[in-house]
Image (cartoon, grey):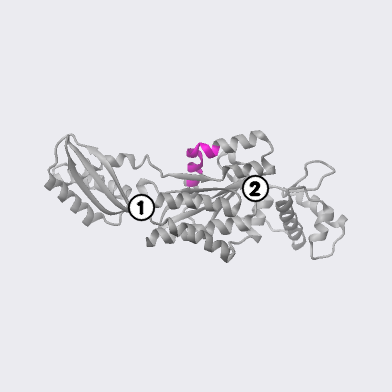
Protein backbone atom coordinates (compact mmCIF):
# COMPACT_ATOMS: atom_id res chain seq x y z
CA UNK A 1 0.00 0.00 0.00
CA UNK A 2 2.65 2.46 -1.09
CA UNK A 3 2.12 6.19 -0.65
CA UNK A 4 2.54 7.63 -4.13
CA UNK A 5 2.13 11.30 -3.18
CA UNK A 6 5.37 13.17 -3.78
CA UNK A 7 6.81 15.73 -1.41
CA UNK A 8 9.65 18.17 -1.94
CA UNK A 9 12.97 17.23 -0.38
CA UNK A 10 12.52 19.90 2.30
CA UNK A 11 9.01 18.73 3.18
CA UNK A 12 10.19 15.11 3.24
CA UNK A 13 13.13 15.89 5.52
CA UNK A 14 10.91 17.81 7.95
CA UNK A 15 8.25 15.09 7.97
CA UNK A 16 10.79 12.32 8.57
CA UNK A 17 12.42 14.34 11.37
CA UNK A 18 9.03 14.78 13.06
CA UNK A 19 8.13 11.08 12.73
CA UNK A 20 11.47 9.94 14.14
CA UNK A 21 11.34 12.40 17.02
CA UNK A 22 7.78 11.46 17.89
CA UNK A 23 8.58 7.73 17.77
CA UNK A 24 11.45 8.36 20.16
CA UNK A 25 9.68 10.61 22.66
CA UNK A 26 5.92 10.23 22.29
CA UNK A 27 5.60 14.02 22.63
CA UNK A 28 4.25 16.49 20.09
CA UNK A 29 7.14 17.96 18.10
CA UNK A 30 7.74 21.71 17.85
CA UNK A 31 9.52 23.67 15.12
CA UNK A 32 12.52 24.35 17.34
CA UNK A 33 13.17 20.66 17.81
CA UNK A 34 12.87 20.06 14.06
CA UNK A 35 15.38 22.82 13.28
CA UNK A 36 17.98 21.04 15.45
CA UNK A 37 17.39 17.71 13.67
CA UNK A 38 17.78 19.00 10.09
CA UNK A 39 21.04 19.05 8.15
CA UNK A 40 19.80 21.98 6.07
CA UNK A 41 19.92 25.26 8.07
CA UNK A 42 16.35 26.61 8.26
CA UNK A 43 14.64 29.16 10.46
CA UNK A 44 11.91 28.20 12.89
CA UNK A 45 9.45 30.31 10.86
CA UNK A 46 10.22 28.38 7.67
CA UNK A 47 9.81 25.08 9.47
CA UNK A 48 6.52 26.22 11.05
CA UNK A 49 5.16 27.16 7.63
CA UNK A 50 6.15 23.79 6.19
CA UNK A 51 4.63 21.98 9.18
CA UNK A 52 1.36 23.86 8.61
CA UNK A 53 1.50 22.82 4.94
CA UNK A 54 2.08 19.17 5.90
CA UNK A 55 -0.84 19.40 8.31
CA UNK A 56 -3.10 20.70 5.53
CA UNK A 57 -2.04 17.68 3.43
CA UNK A 58 -3.07 15.29 6.20
CA UNK A 59 0.42 14.22 7.34
CA UNK A 60 0.39 15.97 10.72
CA UNK A 61 -2.09 16.77 13.46
CA UNK A 62 -1.98 19.32 16.27
CA UNK A 63 -3.46 18.29 19.63
CA UNK A 64 -4.06 21.96 20.55
CA UNK A 65 -3.03 25.36 19.24
CA UNK A 66 0.03 25.89 21.39
CA UNK A 67 1.39 22.35 20.94
CA UNK A 68 3.68 20.91 18.33
CA UNK A 69 2.61 18.37 15.72
CA UNK A 70 2.15 14.63 15.75
CA UNK A 71 2.31 12.24 12.77
CA UNK A 72 -0.93 10.84 11.36
CA UNK A 73 -1.42 7.37 9.87
CA UNK A 74 -0.62 8.95 6.49
CA UNK A 75 2.73 10.20 7.83
CA UNK A 76 3.66 6.78 9.17
CA UNK A 77 2.72 5.21 5.83
CA UNK A 78 4.94 7.69 3.98
CA UNK A 79 7.76 7.09 6.45
CA UNK A 80 7.53 3.30 6.11
CA UNK A 81 7.26 3.31 2.31
CA UNK A 82 10.01 5.86 1.67
CA UNK A 83 12.58 5.49 4.44
CA UNK A 84 12.27 2.14 6.23
CA UNK A 85 13.83 -1.09 5.03
CA UNK A 86 14.26 -4.52 6.58
CA UNK A 87 17.87 -3.96 7.63
CA UNK A 88 20.01 -6.60 9.34
CA UNK A 89 19.49 -7.04 13.04
CA UNK A 90 22.52 -6.95 15.30
CA UNK A 91 24.47 -10.24 15.00
CA UNK A 92 23.88 -11.00 18.70
CA UNK A 93 20.11 -10.56 18.22
CA UNK A 94 20.06 -12.82 15.16
CA UNK A 95 22.05 -15.44 17.06
CA UNK A 96 19.61 -15.26 19.99
CA UNK A 97 16.60 -15.74 17.69
CA UNK A 98 18.29 -18.56 15.78
CA UNK A 99 19.36 -20.50 18.87
CA UNK A 100 15.92 -20.32 20.46
CA UNK A 101 13.97 -21.29 17.35
CA UNK A 102 16.34 -24.04 16.24
CA UNK A 103 16.06 -25.64 19.69
CA UNK A 104 12.28 -26.00 19.16
CA UNK A 105 12.29 -26.76 15.43
CA UNK A 106 11.42 -30.44 15.93
CA UNK A 107 7.94 -29.58 17.21
CA UNK A 108 5.88 -27.09 15.25
CA UNK A 109 3.69 -25.74 18.04
CA UNK A 110 6.63 -25.25 20.40
CA UNK A 111 8.49 -23.37 17.68
CA UNK A 112 5.46 -21.13 16.99
CA UNK A 113 5.06 -20.43 20.71
CA UNK A 114 8.75 -19.58 20.96
CA UNK A 115 8.51 -17.33 17.86
CA UNK A 116 5.67 -15.26 19.36
CA UNK A 117 7.66 -14.81 22.58
CA UNK A 118 10.85 -13.82 20.75
CA UNK A 119 9.03 -11.35 18.49
CA UNK A 120 7.59 -9.65 21.55
CA UNK A 121 10.92 -9.54 23.38
CA UNK A 122 12.95 -8.19 20.48
CA UNK A 123 10.43 -5.71 19.02
CA UNK A 124 8.95 -4.59 22.39
CA UNK A 125 5.44 -5.13 21.01
CA UNK A 126 2.89 -7.93 21.14
CA UNK A 127 4.19 -10.94 19.20
CA UNK A 128 2.03 -13.55 17.49
CA UNK A 129 2.44 -16.66 15.35
CA UNK A 130 -0.23 -18.50 13.37
CA UNK A 131 0.65 -22.18 12.95
CA UNK A 132 -0.44 -24.02 9.79
CA UNK A 133 -4.06 -25.17 9.80
CA UNK A 134 -5.03 -28.74 9.02
CA UNK A 135 -5.99 -27.90 5.45
CA UNK A 136 -2.48 -26.65 4.68
CA UNK A 137 -0.61 -29.64 6.09
CA UNK A 138 1.41 -31.45 3.46
CA UNK A 139 1.06 -35.22 3.53
CA UNK A 140 4.16 -37.36 3.82
CA UNK A 141 2.46 -40.59 4.85
CA UNK A 142 -0.98 -41.84 5.90
CA UNK A 143 -1.80 -45.08 7.71
CA UNK A 144 -5.19 -46.52 8.74
CA UNK A 145 -5.46 -48.82 11.75
CA UNK A 146 -8.67 -50.80 12.30
CA UNK A 147 -10.03 -50.70 15.85
CA UNK A 148 -13.03 -52.37 17.55
CA UNK A 149 -16.55 -50.92 17.31
CA UNK A 150 -16.26 -49.88 13.64
CA UNK A 151 -13.56 -47.33 14.36
CA UNK A 152 -10.45 -46.50 12.36
CA UNK A 153 -7.40 -44.63 13.63
CA UNK A 154 -6.05 -42.27 10.95
CA UNK A 155 -2.34 -41.68 11.50
CA UNK A 156 -0.94 -38.74 9.55
CA UNK A 157 2.70 -37.86 9.07
CA UNK A 158 2.82 -34.35 7.66
CA UNK A 159 5.12 -31.49 6.94
CA UNK A 160 5.69 -29.04 8.50
CA UNK A 161 4.43 -31.04 11.48
CA UNK A 162 5.30 -34.40 12.96
CA UNK A 163 2.72 -37.11 13.66
CA UNK A 164 -0.92 -36.79 14.64
CA UNK A 165 -3.96 -39.02 14.67
CA UNK A 166 -7.75 -38.83 14.36
CA UNK A 167 -10.48 -41.37 15.12
CA UNK A 168 -13.14 -42.09 12.48
CA UNK A 169 -16.28 -44.08 13.23
CA UNK A 170 -17.56 -45.99 10.19
CA UNK A 171 -21.13 -46.85 9.27
CA UNK A 172 -19.97 -50.01 7.54
CA UNK A 173 -16.94 -52.19 8.04
CA UNK A 174 -13.77 -51.82 5.96
CA UNK A 175 -11.42 -54.78 6.11
CA UNK A 176 -7.76 -54.38 7.15
CA UNK A 177 -6.76 -55.33 3.59
CA UNK A 178 -8.93 -52.58 2.14
CA UNK A 179 -7.53 -50.09 4.63
CA UNK A 180 -3.99 -50.97 3.56
CA UNK A 181 -4.94 -50.64 -0.12
CA UNK A 182 -6.55 -47.26 0.52
CA UNK A 183 -3.47 -46.01 2.39
CA UNK A 184 -1.18 -47.25 -0.40
CA UNK A 185 -3.30 -45.41 -2.96
CA UNK A 186 -3.15 -42.13 -1.02
CA UNK A 187 0.59 -42.40 -0.31
CA UNK A 188 1.35 -43.17 -3.96
CA UNK A 189 -0.99 -40.65 -5.58
CA UNK A 190 -0.92 -37.75 -3.15
CA UNK A 191 2.35 -37.60 -1.27
CA UNK A 192 3.33 -33.94 -1.12
CA UNK A 193 -0.26 -32.70 -1.52
CA UNK A 194 -2.06 -30.69 1.16
CA UNK A 195 -4.97 -32.39 2.94
CA UNK A 196 -7.37 -29.80 1.57
CA UNK A 197 -6.22 -30.42 -2.00
CA UNK A 198 -6.49 -34.22 -1.58
CA UNK A 199 -10.04 -33.96 -0.28
CA UNK A 200 -11.12 -31.76 -3.19
CA UNK A 201 -9.45 -34.02 -5.75
CA UNK A 202 -11.12 -37.17 -4.38
CA UNK A 203 -14.58 -35.61 -4.53
CA UNK A 204 -13.83 -34.28 -8.01
CA UNK A 205 -12.89 -37.76 -9.23
CA UNK A 206 -16.01 -39.25 -7.71
CA UNK A 207 -18.18 -36.61 -9.39
CA UNK A 208 -16.54 -37.29 -12.74
CA UNK A 209 -17.27 -41.00 -12.31
CA UNK A 210 -20.92 -40.10 -11.67
CA UNK A 211 -21.27 -43.37 -9.77
CA UNK A 212 -19.83 -44.72 -6.56
CA UNK A 213 -18.93 -48.09 -8.08
CA UNK A 214 -15.22 -47.67 -7.41
CA UNK A 215 -14.83 -49.24 -3.99
CA UNK A 216 -11.41 -47.67 -3.49
CA UNK A 217 -12.72 -44.12 -3.97
CA UNK A 218 -15.66 -44.93 -1.72
CA UNK A 219 -13.28 -45.97 1.04
CA UNK A 220 -11.13 -42.89 0.56
CA UNK A 221 -14.17 -40.61 0.74
CA UNK A 222 -15.48 -42.40 3.83
CA UNK A 223 -12.17 -42.16 5.63
CA UNK A 224 -11.84 -38.54 4.62
CA UNK A 225 -15.00 -37.65 6.49
CA UNK A 226 -12.59 -36.68 9.26
CA UNK A 227 -11.47 -34.06 6.76
CA UNK A 228 -14.69 -32.17 7.40
CA UNK A 229 -12.82 -30.60 10.27
CA UNK A 230 -10.15 -29.42 7.81
CA UNK A 231 -12.10 -26.38 6.68
CA UNK A 232 -13.04 -25.62 10.28
CA UNK A 233 -9.48 -25.72 11.63
CA UNK A 234 -7.53 -22.61 10.68
CA UNK A 235 -4.47 -23.26 12.80
CA UNK A 236 -3.29 -22.40 16.30
CA UNK A 237 -2.62 -18.77 17.17
CA UNK A 238 0.05 -17.95 19.76
CA UNK A 239 0.12 -14.46 21.29
CA UNK A 240 2.78 -13.18 23.67
CA UNK A 241 3.64 -9.90 25.38
CA UNK A 242 0.16 -8.42 25.81
CA UNK A 243 1.34 -6.79 29.04
CA UNK A 244 3.80 -4.67 27.03
CA UNK A 245 0.99 -2.49 25.70
CA UNK A 246 0.16 -1.37 29.24
CA UNK A 247 3.30 0.78 29.22
CA UNK A 248 2.50 2.50 25.90
CA UNK A 249 1.39 6.11 26.22
CA UNK A 250 -0.98 5.63 23.26
CA UNK A 251 -3.12 3.31 25.37
CA UNK A 252 -3.63 5.72 28.26
CA UNK A 253 -7.23 5.87 26.99
CA UNK A 254 -8.68 2.93 28.89
CA UNK A 255 -11.33 2.33 26.22
CA UNK A 256 -8.71 1.88 23.45
CA UNK A 257 -6.69 -0.40 25.73
CA UNK A 258 -9.73 -2.50 26.61
CA UNK A 259 -10.72 -2.91 22.95
CA UNK A 260 -7.21 -4.01 21.92
CA UNK A 261 -6.90 -6.51 24.76
CA UNK A 262 -10.31 -7.94 23.89
CA UNK A 263 -9.23 -8.31 20.25
CA UNK A 264 -6.04 -10.12 21.26
CA UNK A 265 -8.01 -12.41 23.58
CA UNK A 266 -10.69 -13.09 20.95
CA UNK A 267 -8.13 -14.76 18.72
CA UNK A 268 -10.64 -15.39 15.94
CA UNK A 269 -10.67 -11.64 15.20
CA UNK A 270 -6.89 -11.45 14.87
CA UNK A 271 -6.83 -14.64 12.80
CA UNK A 272 -9.28 -13.11 10.32
CA UNK A 273 -6.98 -10.12 9.89
CA UNK A 274 -3.94 -12.38 9.37
CA UNK A 275 -5.68 -14.64 6.88
CA UNK A 276 -6.87 -11.61 4.91
CA UNK A 277 -3.24 -10.40 4.72
CA UNK A 278 -2.01 -13.77 3.48
CA UNK A 279 -4.71 -14.05 0.81
CA UNK A 280 -3.00 -11.27 -1.14
CA UNK A 281 -0.20 -13.77 -1.91
CA UNK A 282 2.22 -10.85 -2.06
CA UNK A 283 5.72 -11.78 -0.83
CA UNK A 284 7.50 -10.17 2.09
CA UNK A 285 6.30 -8.21 5.07
CA UNK A 286 2.78 -6.71 5.15
CA UNK A 287 2.24 -3.54 7.20
CA UNK A 288 -1.21 -2.24 8.16
CA UNK A 289 -1.16 1.16 9.84
CA UNK A 290 -4.08 2.57 11.82
CA UNK A 291 -7.23 2.77 9.72
CA UNK A 292 -5.74 0.44 7.10
CA UNK A 293 -6.75 -2.33 9.53
CA UNK A 294 -10.13 -3.84 8.67
CA UNK A 295 -10.71 -4.71 12.33
CA UNK A 296 -12.14 -1.53 13.89
CA UNK A 297 -10.67 -2.30 17.32
CA UNK A 298 -7.17 -2.23 15.83
CA UNK A 299 -7.44 1.07 13.98
CA UNK A 300 -5.16 2.81 16.46
CA UNK A 301 -2.50 0.10 16.03
CA UNK A 302 0.06 -1.06 13.49
CA UNK A 303 0.11 -4.70 12.43
CA UNK A 304 3.29 -6.10 10.83
CA UNK A 305 2.83 -9.57 9.33
CA UNK A 306 4.97 -11.95 7.28
CA UNK A 307 3.92 -15.29 5.79
CA UNK A 308 5.50 -18.59 6.81
CA UNK A 309 6.36 -20.98 3.99
CA UNK A 310 6.85 -24.70 3.77
CA UNK A 311 9.08 -24.71 0.70
CA UNK A 312 7.05 -22.55 -1.72
CA UNK A 313 3.69 -22.98 0.00
CA UNK A 314 2.39 -20.32 2.45
CA UNK A 315 1.22 -22.22 5.54
CA UNK A 316 1.03 -19.69 8.36
CA UNK A 317 2.08 -16.23 9.53
CA UNK A 318 3.84 -14.37 12.28
CA UNK A 319 4.31 -10.76 13.27
CA UNK A 320 3.79 -8.04 15.83
CA UNK A 321 1.06 -5.60 16.79
CA UNK A 322 1.60 -2.36 18.68
CA UNK A 323 0.80 1.35 18.62
CA UNK A 324 1.25 3.28 15.37
CA UNK A 325 4.13 4.99 17.20
CA UNK A 326 6.55 2.09 17.05
CA UNK A 327 10.17 1.53 16.09
CA UNK A 328 9.34 0.47 12.54
CA UNK A 329 12.90 -0.33 11.49
CA UNK A 330 13.42 -2.75 14.38
CA UNK A 331 9.94 -4.28 14.19
CA UNK A 332 10.07 -4.89 10.43
CA UNK A 333 13.59 -6.33 10.59
CA UNK A 334 12.60 -8.64 13.47
CA UNK A 335 9.49 -9.94 11.72
CA UNK A 336 11.33 -10.37 8.40
CA UNK A 337 14.27 -12.27 9.92
CA UNK A 338 12.10 -14.49 12.15
CA UNK A 339 9.74 -15.37 9.29
CA UNK A 340 12.61 -16.32 6.97
CA UNK A 341 14.26 -18.40 9.69
CA UNK A 342 11.06 -20.21 10.65
CA UNK A 343 10.30 -20.95 6.99
CA UNK A 344 13.81 -22.35 6.50
CA UNK A 345 13.51 -24.53 9.60
CA UNK A 346 10.07 -25.79 8.55
CA UNK A 347 11.25 -26.63 5.04
CA UNK A 348 14.45 -28.39 6.06
CA UNK A 349 13.31 -30.17 9.21
Is any part of residue 214 visible from this angle?
Answer: no
1 and 2 marks in contact (CB < 8 Å): no
Is residue 266 rendered magenta in the image? yes
Residue sitting at 33 percent across and 39 percent down? 229
Q: Nearer the viewer, residue 345 or 77?
A: 345
Classify residue 247 as left or right of residue 344: right
User: What is the secondary structure assignment of the residue under circle 1?
Assistant: loop
Classify residue 218 as left or right of residue 256: left
Q: Quadrant of the C terminus?
A: bottom left
On the image, the x and y values in percent for residue 114 come to 48, 51
Residue 95 — which label? none
Question: Which residue does the numbered mark 2 point to in the structure image?
Answer: 324
User: What is the secondary structure assignment of the residue under circle 2?
Assistant: loop
| Label 2 environment density (alpha carbons within 10 Å; few <14, some 14–19, many ≥20) | many
Q: Nearer the viewer, residue 346 or 86?
A: 346
Question: Which residue does the numbered mark 1 point to in the structure image?
Answer: 161
Classify residue 4 as left or right of residue 174: right
On the image, the x and y values in percent for residue 212 come to 16, 41
Residue sitting at 78 percent across and 50 percent down? 29
SS assignment for the magenta stretch, majority: helix
The quadrant holding residue 93 is bottom right
Classify residue 121 as left or right of residue 19: left
The quadrant holding residue 262 is top right
Q: Which residues are magenta?
A: 263-274
Is residue 253 rendered magenta in the image? no
Is any part of residue 152 visible from this angle?
Answer: yes
Alpha carbon separation for disc pair 1 and 2: 35 Å
On the image, the x and y values in percent for residue 137 come to 35, 51
| Dot placed on the residue nearer the N-terminal end, 1 or 2 | 1
Amino acid sequence: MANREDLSKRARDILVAIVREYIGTGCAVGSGTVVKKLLEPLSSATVRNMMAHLESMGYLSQPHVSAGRMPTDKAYRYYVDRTVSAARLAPATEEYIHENLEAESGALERMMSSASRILSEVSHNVGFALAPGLEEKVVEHIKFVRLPDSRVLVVLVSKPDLVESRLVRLEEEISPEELDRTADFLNTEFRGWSLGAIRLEIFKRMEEERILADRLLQNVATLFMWGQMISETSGSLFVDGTAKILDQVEFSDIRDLKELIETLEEKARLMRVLIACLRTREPGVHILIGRENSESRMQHCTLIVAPLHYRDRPVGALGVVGPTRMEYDRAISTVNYTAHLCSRLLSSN
